[in-house]
Every structure is written in C-alpha cells, then in structure tokens.
Amino acid sequence: MDKARYIMIGGFLGAGKTTAVLALARHLRAAGKRPGLITNDQSFGLVDTAMLSSNGFDVEEIGGGCFCCRFNSLVEASENLSKESRPDAFVAEPVGSCTDLRAAVSYPLRRIYGNDFEVAPLSVLVDPVRAERMLGLTEGRAFAPKVHYVYDKQLEEADAIVINKADTIDASRLERLQTALKNRYPHAAQFVVSARNGHGLPAWFDYVLTESSGSQTAPEVDYQVYAEGEALLGWLNATVQLSGPEFDGNAFLQSLAARLKTGMVSGEIAHLKMTLSPDQGNDIAVINLVRNDTSAELSHRLQAPLESGELILNLRAEEDPELLWELAQQALKDTAAEYSIHSSLVQQEHFRPAPPNPTYRMALA
C-alpha cells in the first residue's frame, strides 16, 4: 500500500491557513483522493475544526499544545483518521504561534514513522500586509520584537513561503514583498496565491503533493526567546449558546466583531475567528479579523435567520488575556442585548501559552 502523504501548512496567526487547508482538501477530493485533516491549538474548542467539519471533511483536533509538544497526539490523530477513512493525505494545520516544526515534527516523522508517511515540504503562509510590516516595508502596527522572532523563525525554516491573499495588495507592493522575502529567505521556494479565490493554488498544490521535504539542517531556535515571544500573546477560546426570538446570525457576528475590534485599544489583534452554527441543520457562519486596522470578513454566511445556535469565539492578541476575557464578556452582553437574545456560556479558557517543550528535536533529516 502506498504511504500516506503528510502535508503541514504553517504560518503566523491570521495568514489564512484554514482557508488554504479547506481549498487543498477540496482539491484532493475532486481528484478522487481521501483527505484527513488535523487542527491544532493551545486550547480546545476551535473555530477551525467547526468550519472544516461543516464542509464534510474528517477532522481530528489536537488541543492543549502545539504539534511539537503533542507529537504523540499527532500520530494518534493520524491513526484515528486512518481507522475511519484511510486518508491518502493528511493535511495538518499547526498553531499559528508555533515554530521549529522542521526539527520537532517533519524530521521526527521521517525518521521514526518513515514507513507510514511521505512527508511533504513545509509550507509557511504569510498575510502580505502583516509581512510588509514585519519586514519593515511599510509602517503600521506590528508586534513586539520577541513575537517578531517567532515570525522570523517560521519563515527561516520553510521549504516554501506562500504569499496568501495576493488579491489584497497591488502589483507593485506584491513585487516588493516577493523580492524582500527572497532576499531574506533565499532557500525557500515561493508561491503567490489567494486561497479565497483560487489564484495560484494549482502550482502550490502540485508542489506539496509531489515534492519531498527538504533535508537541510533545521535553524537553531532560542527557546527562551521563543517562549517569551509566545507568552506575549493572549489566548481566548469561548463557546456560547445563543437563544431567543429569531435573529440574523450574520449581522450578529458582524456586530460582535465590531465591538471586539473597537474595544482593543492598546493591544494588537493577531486573529479573531468566530463561527455561529444553528442548533438545527448543518449551516454555519464564519467571520475573521486579522488586524486592528482592517474590517472583519464574513467568509461564510448563514442562509436563513435562526432562533438558537452555538457561537465559538477564538481571539489571539498581544494583550493581557484577562483583559481579552473582560472585553469579550462585555461585547457578548451588549450584542445579545442589541438582538434581544439570551447568551449562555458553555465553556471558556483564557491564558498565555506555556513554554514550548518539544517531544523530539532532530536538527537533521
């Protein structure tokens, strides 16, 4: 039997990884292949899992730490998917604040489970506007230097840097960004895509489905700086039950996102993601906000009003997690009042990520 292909799609928070994972999964299905998807987070209750599952794909969620630190859980997730659907390819999306994936995931998979997996090149996605700011090409709100360290290490270890959302900047800015990335990370292949509209995806998909992962020595990582950079980010996951008279769920999400954005006075949003799913049926609304100075995007819309449903809220920002939770509570209260509905908290967790402690670290393939 042919070995299953393991494809990891990394990148910083807000780079569009989940949209890219969904596009690749659809591409595989259209080609008669069976994809198995694996999501990952520092906590539990992921928008990503809900959104991918709503599109009819088999998904395993690994919470409580990154792939590097939950390596055995990653293997178990692959085994669970294999029992259910025997995937031809596993598509895995690591935590957006995680780095050292080459040494802590790709190489251990090759050396320990090489009989089971064919490991694809490591792709790292970037949001072009965020990348411009992180590389100093344009002005705008950016993150602290230690957060920037994590961002830089993600790109340094990439086999391929994928500039996503290419339709959001003009050609001259895109060309300047491509040049800057190639000068700084000359080893990496480069692709320009829009996971949303399909531009450039065939060439990138062909690359990850046919090429093998690189064998160069993994970059050195200062785990103290890495840990301090991650710890500057506040994490908030919450699941909320909404009920009341019939209301417009799409408008509710837009109003809630606007309140959360307005309330972020000092901190910088890395990614706000929310889904709203009616209690009846398989419909879903998905909204994303990736910076303070942009608008929230409603990427999936509910087809009809609803009377009750489940809201999943994931917020990542360079801010005190206690302040994030206070902001979220007030925004939920005010938005529920606006629509005359009741909100009931099912679960929530807010924290700063713990220091990374990889299960394995292999600098060589």
Image (cartoon, rainbow, N blue to C red):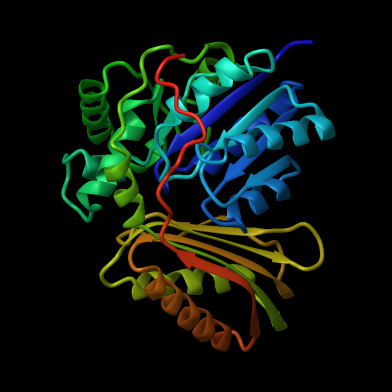
Residue 301 location, x and y as percent?
Answer: 62, 59
Q: Where does residue 346 sit, x and y in percent of width and height?
A: 66, 74
Residue 79 in the figure: left or right of residue 162: right
Image height of 81 relative to 209, above or below: below
Q: Is residue 194 left or right of residue 347?
A: left
Please report the residue visible at 66 percent of the width from the left and 37 percent of the height from the top.
37
Residue 167 position within the rendered picture, expressed as x and y whole percent measured from the top left: 39, 39
Q: Is residue 298 visible?
A: yes
Q: Residue at x 80, y 26 (%)?
A: 86
Image position of 5 (left or right of 102):
right
**Residue at position x 70%, y 32% in the image:** 78
86 over 241 or under it: above or below = above
Task: Choose between 290 and 60: the one closer to the eye.
Answer: 60
Residue drawn 21% across the image and 28% down it: 180
The quadrant where residue 124 appears: top left
Number of numbered tags placed on the structure image: 0
Say whether residue 189 is left or right of residue 300: left
Residue 33 sits in which quadrant?
A: top right
Residue 23 seen in this snapshot: no
Q: Position of residue 1 (x, y in %)?
A: 79, 10
